[in-house]
Amino acid sequence: MNYYLKKSLIFLFSLFFVICITFFLMKSIPGDPFTSEQEMPKEILDSLYAHYGFDKPLYVQFFKYLKGIATFNLGPSYVYEGKMVGSIIKEAFPISAFIGLQAILIALIFGISLGVIAAIKQNKWVDRFILILSVSCVSIPSFLLATLLQYVLSIKLSLFPIARWGTYWHTVLPTLALAATPMAFILKMIRANLIDIYKMNFIKLAHAKGLSNMQILIKHALPNAILPVISYLGPITAYVLTGSFIIEKIFGIPGMGQWLIISIHNRDYTMIMGFTIFYSTVLMLSVFLVDLLYSWIDPRIQLKNETKNFEIPLP
Amino acid sequence: MISIKANIKDSPYYAPIMIISIYLISLFLCAIFVPIFSPYSYSDIHLHLKNSPPSFAHIFGTDELGRDIFTRTMYGAKISLSVGIIAALLDILVGILWGSIAALAPKKVDETMMRICDIISSIPYLLIVILLIIVFGPGFLSIIIALSITGWMNMARIIRGEVLKIKEKEYIAAAKVLGCSKWRLLYSHFLPNMIGPIIVTLTFTIPHAIFTEAFLSFLGLGIQAPISSWGVMVNDSIGAMRYYPWRLFFPAFFMMSTLLSLNLLGDFLKELFDPRRGSND
Amino acid sequence: MTDISINNLTVDYGKTYGLKDISFTIKKGTITGIVGQSGSGKTTLSLALTGLIQCKSLSGSLDIFDHHYAIEDTLSLKKALKNDFGIIFQDPMTFLNPLMKIGKQIAERFQGKNIKEKVYQILDEVGLSDQQYYHRYPHELSGGERQRVLIAIAIAHKPKLLICDEPTSSLDAGTKKQIILLLKKIQSKYQMSMLIISHDLHFIASLTQTCIVLLNGQIVEHGNIFANQKHSYTKQLLFKSDRFFQQNKEKIS
């Protein structure tokens, strides 16, 4: 089957699967959003149920919800009167996206550069230092790093604003905290790939052609080393998406993460469902786009199942 | 095994590995014995001593309810390590079963099983975990179940790959001809070859589980008070870090060191078991 | 002087010697073969000459026409590779960058203007005349075509010496023949001297005029070994392919 078609189908099917799971999980929680509040007269409860559609059978509610998703209507928040889940996402997502994208960019830039340096100076002290640094970045959970950065750079040294949102400087520490782990992963990948690639024969031939070391690195080694990293962008996006929850909490940033945490505390089910589905969609879309990107760059991926249309005439 | 010993000294991780092993073993012992022998329990409240800095009586200080932080940190070690190890073992088990069944099954079954694996992998695992915790309610057991449901895919893929590779080899065909049952094949021929990847994955899954538990604690969905996991202790002390930094420092330090040690150990083991090492170019 | 000579080439791996004080001369325009069993030092020789070898110590020199190169000096060898000799290897796939068009990979040999023209020219020389080949990727070519690409890269600057290390070992019989014809054509057109390293005696016999036999890193014999063998080892080597030589005794001599 066509590569793109296959990937699109997997994407849609996975998304549907997420929606089902999320919906039925939420509905399976005993009680509903209103039972925790004060004793309400039955009539009010009943009218609330009718208003939100709880009185209808489960499959009806499910189809109603599906219909809603198709029209980008994720329903109202149970807790915040009058606010729609969709509008909250519209406000909060750009903020989270900004930090997330910046983090990925930083991770790529520093991950690749440091990985290259580590590979070139393999086993010397520079390499070992970079390796230990990268393992540390992987091991320090982003929230601990965020706390550390906040404590040292904001509270003690007053270099950056402590929390909240406003200027560009507010984005620096959250970005650094998020970027550390992906940067370390990319670094290790690039280093390992480069070490393997330099043992390969086509590099030897490049030497034999008389190319300089810099030319070999940039034209031959690096493109081959970066290729696997591209397919890794999917998991990195996932990490950044979920990591942002806590980073936003620590830095008081009004992004998606903070809203999700509040919704979890309040047991605001439509919010939780809406956010989960939105997150999953964003992630799956990114993975899909990354797959596309990869297939464009690597000439070896067969996009369609057609035979090559030129024959080699044998002399 | 001889070639493995010869290569240990070459690894850039050699010196740190000695330190790491000592640290992990000590931590393990403390996690078991400190809660038993400490004069304080992890939940003993001494309000008159609340928020006091490290002292002779309380070597790590006390928290906002006057509880001894040293005892709580070591108890937290017990909890965090237990969560990590149990969840990791379950993940490995499910992964091995899933992967080997998929590899040995007919093609259609294999494809379906791996398709399911792919679909679950494409959903951010933390979201699934959060949802599951909301449904089951927070607690030790819920976390372990949630981690088991979301963490087995990697191991399954690796095991499936290894089994497929070995499946084709001649000595398997020979054993089949001699009448070996499929299960016997699995355990006596396949598994010994896969010890390497299994141990490496295990070593990496434990810090992953500890991280997830800490993450959940930040959302209020982790282990519930008064039980102290490192995640809970860190979450409780962030707000007070300006005034009582020791409350954050100790659990954070141990969490970081443990995660760091396990990850370094995993890297080391990965290099050790890599079949390409030791080959000349 | 139009001869090529390897002088006193020694490769020391520490525990063993890869090559021990090897010296021989190649007359201009001739094809010399190097045979020997695995481990005799055949590949060590080609690796040493390209400066790609990893060993404890290396010594010796290479004289190509009037240019003298010291083998332990990798920079000087690189210069030699650029201008005076070319080399091709077994298993061409691994020698090509999978992400780069082959036209571009050949173009790296050229500088200045009209590089594309030069690439088309050299592709034509090796029998890949269709200009489409410029835009192909290595995985899109057959084994024989890839080997032709490697040959194109090697002879781009019309070097004085072409070294071929097991050039046809990974090819099927039909393609082997084509490559042999190509090499012969190149040799006669450019009067290029060639050094062919192989364990395939059939291949060597059909291509070379004179042959060097290596054993444990030393030269045992150098001459037309198919006509007469001076050393007992050479005799052994030839008559191991007993059946072949019984059948083809007339063709060879």
Image: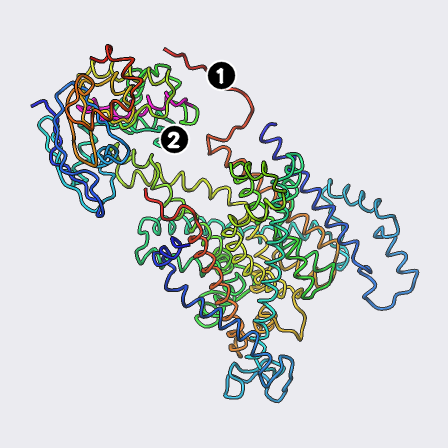
Q: Quadrant of the N terminus of chain B?
A: bottom left
Q: Does the magenta stretch include residue C162?
A: yes
Asked whether the viewer can see residue C112, the reply is no
Q: Nearer the viewer, residue A220 or C50?
A: C50
| Amino acid type assigned to the residue bearing label 1 in the image | Asn
Looking at the picture, how far across and down is residue C104, in whole percent? 34, 27
Q: Name the residue under label 1.
A: A309
Q: Which colour scheme is used?
A: rainbow
Say above or below: C121 vs A198: above
Numbered range of the magenta stretch: C141-164
Q: Is residue A225 magenta?
A: no
Question: Label 1 to label 2, Cα distance in Å?
Answer: 21 Å
Q: Is residue B6 left or right of residue B99?
A: left
Q: Determine which quarter of the picture holds residue C72.
A: top left
Looking at the picture, how far across and down is residue B123, in whole percent? 63, 48
Q: Determine which quarter of the picture holds residue C60.
A: top left
Say above or below: B32 vs C106: below
Chain holding disc 1 = A
Q: Are marks 1 and 2 in one subunit? A: no
Residue found at the far right of this picture = A43
Asked whether the viewer can see residue C192, the reply is yes
Q: Nearer the viewer, residue A104 or B76?
A: B76
Looking at the picture, how far across and down is residue C234, in whole percent? 20, 26
Say above or below: B163 vs B198: above
Q: Mark 2 points at which residue?
A: C100
Q: In this view, does C199 lie to the left or right of B221?
A: left
Q: Which of A230 and A156 is in front in this view?
A: A230
Residue found at the far left of this picture = C1
Disc 2 is placed on an element classified as loop
